[in-house]
Image: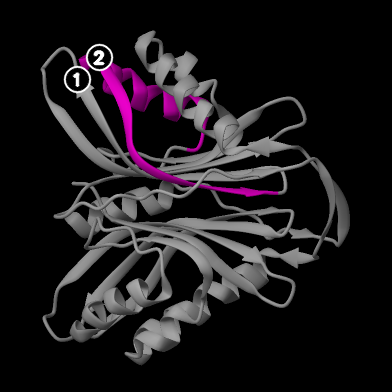
Amino acid sequence: MKTLALWSILIALPTVSLAEMPQHTEVCVAATDKDIAALFDRWNESLKTGDPYKVVANYAPKSVLLATVSSKPRFTVDEKADYFHHFLQNQPDGRIDSRTIELDCNLAIDEGLYSFTFKKTGVTVKARYSFTYKWDGKQWLITSHHSSRVPTEEAPLEEPPHAVARHSEVCVAITEKEIEALLERWRESIQSGNPHKVISHYASKSVLLPLSSTKPRLTLDDKEDYFRQFLKNKPLVHINSHTIELDCNTAINEGLYTYTFQKTGTIVNARYSIVYKWDGLQWLITSDHSSIYPQ
């Protein structure tokens, strides 16, 4: 039944045609950590209205919601509104517990740990989150929102505040096929069983919110420690579906994949959101959020 449910969702996913972005120069809007942090406050205030369409107004027309308690990826306005219609019934109030913010050219990532207190039931739920925001020329809107339950442990995720001034940036040419190849290269490194090969795909400044731990892995040593344990069960990775967004020197690949652990025979369906950044020489992962597929 689980397999049937998964394939039903995969069939329902929209087909994303391959696209490319030629080399160009882009004017990058000025932004600070404070500006981006305020976007969560805006989103949280819209939750308090109880109106799902006011919540959805925070999302770009082309955006993906991988919600905490739903296994269905939400692409359209109506799909997101349907999720929030049910989510808002218990009157949630969100709070950031810890976060890190990355500022790029007309794109920003806010990720960490948050809590929701549901006024109707009195229940408090902790979760992990990744918001990707894009400047559309007038305002910042969410293009990717991945929220997942906290597995077993907690750790703070904090960085000193920083800012980026308004500037121009030369944006490297890139295609969706090239971004797909990056995930394939990462998949092959997972199957090599060598944690050092896996972490070679991550930027020195990057965040890993892994499948089986809520401890955010900020340093390469932290990541290598996680993958050393994770690879002991000999995982094989199969990409089931994905969507890719290309931006100025950044790209997002998110979707559904399946792990088969050869040592135990366990099969785990999961969701992923991976952000890549061009460092002048190569594309590296700056954000990787993986979560077990909700039941």
For image coordinates 41% across by 52% down, the residue present is 11
The residues bearing labels 1 and 2 have C-alpha atoms spaced at a distance of 5 Å
Give the x, y percent position of residue 132: 54, 43
**Mark before the other along the chain sequence, 1 or 2:** 2
Helix, strand or loop at mark 2: loop
Give the x, y percent position of residue 202: 50, 72
Give the image quarter of residue 288. bottom left
Name the outermost residue toward the front: 160
Provide the residue designation for mark 1.
118
Magenta stretch in the rendered image: 75-104
Give the image quarter of residue 210. bottom left
For image coordinates 63% across by 58% down, the residue present is 251
In this picture, residue 158 sits left or right of residue 92: right
In magenta segment, residue 264? no
Marks 1 and 2 close (CB-CB < 8 Å): yes
Provide the residue designation for mark 2.
91
Query: Which mark, by number, is residue 86?
Result: none
Give the image quarter of residue 115. top left
Q: Which amino acid does label 2 sit on?
A: Gln
